Structures are given as structure tokens and as C-alpha cells.
Amino acid sequence: MRLIRGLYNIPSDFSGCVATIGNFDGVHLGHQAILQQLKKQGAEHQLPTVVMMFEPQPREFFAPDQAPARLANMSEKLQDLASFGVDYVLCLPFNQKLRSMSADQFIQTILLDGLRIRHLIVGDDFRFGCDRTGDYQLLQKAGQESGFSVEDTKTFEVEGKRVSSTRIRDCLSANDLDAVNKLLGRPYRMSGRIGYGRQLGRTIGVPTANVILQRNKLPMTGVYAVKAIEIEVAGCNESQVLDHSGNVKVWQGVANIGVKPTVAGTPEPSLEVHIFDFSDDVYGKRLSIEFCQKIREEQKFNGLDELKAAISNDMKVARDFFNN
């Protein structure tokens, strides 16, 4: 799968595509149904498939303080899209220029001139263009005039309710990991490279791996029983994103996810993982952390003795969970 950053980086020999547009946050079962539609239409039209997205996401552009936490960072999202066979991801900067673009300009500049669109898959409630004046009916009219077809996405439900990123965030807030996993079709994970943290754990005999999250907000906090999966991705860079490959190792452990104050006093998302019965050096490696069971909420402690007692109990609860 190839990542294209910006409209002007589309290859000059690009001869058309089948595309869809969306945030695809978490790539849940609803998204997966859209990707299946996309792949089917790509095969029928004998054209590459494209997922178009925006950075930042529109809600983050208009109201950054009110925008919800993402389920996945950009790297995780690209890995998930690659695993479902998407050929290209076109990432456009959502800025004042794009925000001011009229619906007709969006169709002409991005869909026709840029992507040379042949078939487009969007929800029938999809809105675009300045002040959200563009809609599904306008796309259909433009398609009839310019020679591309438009198809709406099918609503995907689990237990009688629509699957959405918002619903998954609500389930995470309610500590319902079983529901989250059902809506995703897989366990919920976060991944990142291991960097140097404060190394407080080493001073109390519980070394932790500090996972660099590349997130501004967290969809969940607390202490969890986790699985840590070491991922080696060969040849992965911004323009050519590959699916997980190479040697994969899985360990059990306990993790704390939350916020820690920086020197300037600004909270910073943090994920620290203690891996059971483990002594290897993982600095610089990439871990995927699978959240299996919540143990407790984050809390402050009155000194190291109280902290050590809580961690000892967390480890016991996590080991009991895995043993059972």
C-alpha cells in the first residue's frame, strides 16, 4: 500500500481509481464493510482502490479542544488499511484552503483532476465543501455529467445498533473491552516504539517499557492486564507501508495508560508496560499492546511504598487473569 501526502504527489501516470472518503478511526467492522465494497468495485472496474482522509481530521481543525480522542494514531490506521488490501491512501491537509473550497471545486479539483475518479463510495449523509453545502445528491449529479458512479455505504450493525468510532469510545469509557473487541472484530491495541522514560520502575524493581504513543489525547486510562507483541516491520516508511511481517513474539504483562506532567506542566499521554519474566532490551523496538482486562483506575500514591504495594497487587491480578 502506498501513502500519498497531498494532491500534487499523485503520480502523473495515475489513470483512475475507485475511492472512498472518511476518517477510518479504528478501522472497525463498519469500516471493514466499506473496504470490502471498495475492493469489490476495484476488481469490477479493474482499477486501484483509494482511501482519502484528512489531517488533521475536520473536527480537530474546527474545535481541537472538543475533538474526541482517536482510537488509532496515523501509523496504526495505515497498518490496518494495508491489512485490508487498500492500494493507496491519499492524505490531504485539512487547512483553510481546503475548508474554503466550494463543493463544485472539491469535485473538480480533487475527485476529477486529482484522482480521476471512476467510482466513489460514501455515506448518503456525507457532506463536503465550504459550509458543508455538498451532499450525496450533488455527487450523483456530477457523476452523471462527468462519467463516474456513486455508491452509498451500507449501515453495519452489531446487536441492533450502528457500529461507529463514537460507540467504541463510549465502550472504552465504560470499561467494556468485550464490546469493543466485538465492534472492532479484533482485540483493541495501541502500538509504538519503545523510548526512554523516567525509569522510575527500575528503582523499585519493576522495569517498564515506555511506549511512544504519538497521540494528543487518550480514549482510555487506567491499569490493565495486557499482551505485548513485538513487531518487526521490514522496509516500512512513509511512502510504502507494509503489513506486519517478520518475527512476532508475545508476552504477558501489566500496563498503566494515562497522562504524566511534562516539565512545562502540560499533561502528556503515557503508556508504560511491565512485561512478566522478561529481561531483554526492547529500546527502539516496536510493541503492540493488546488490552485484555482492566484492573483499576489511575491513582496517586503517598510515597514509593504505597506505589510498590499497588503495583505488586496489579501484577498478581494480571497473572491470575491470564492463568484463568
Image (cartoon, rainbow, N blue to C red):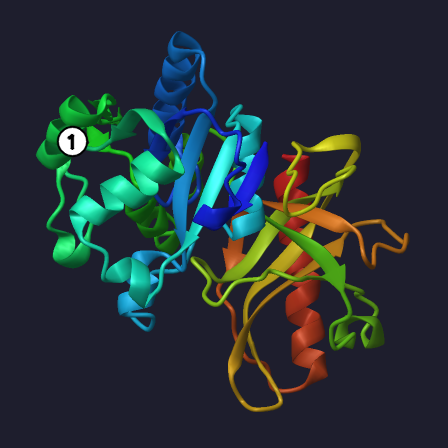
Q: Which residue is mark 1?
A: 142
* Image quadrant in which you'd find residue 178: top left
* Image quadrant in which you'd find residue 249: top right
**Residue 80 placed where, x, y %?**
53, 35
Q: Nearer the viewer, residue 310 or 201?
A: 201
Q: Is residue 11 above or below residue 58?
A: above
Q: Quadrant of the N terminus?
A: top right
Q: Quadrant of the C terminus?
A: top right
Q: Is residue 18 above or below residue 199?
A: above
Q: Nearer the viewer, residue 113 or 154?
A: 113
Query: Looking at numbered disc 1 in the image, what kind of residue is underneath it?
Result: Ala
- Give the SS element for disc 1: helix
Q: Is residue 141 visible?
A: yes
Q: Residue at x 78, y 70 (%)?
A: 196
Q: Is residue 269 above or below residue 279?
A: below
Q: Is residue 78 left or right of residue 143?
A: right
**Residue 216 placed where, x, y %?**
48, 67
Q: Residue at x 60, y 60 (%)?
A: 213
Q: Residue furthest right?
A: 280
* Image quadrant in which you'd find residue 234: top right
**Residue 11 placed where, x, y %?**
54, 37
Q: Residue at x 13, y 58 (%)?
A: 131
Q: Is residue 21 visible?
A: no
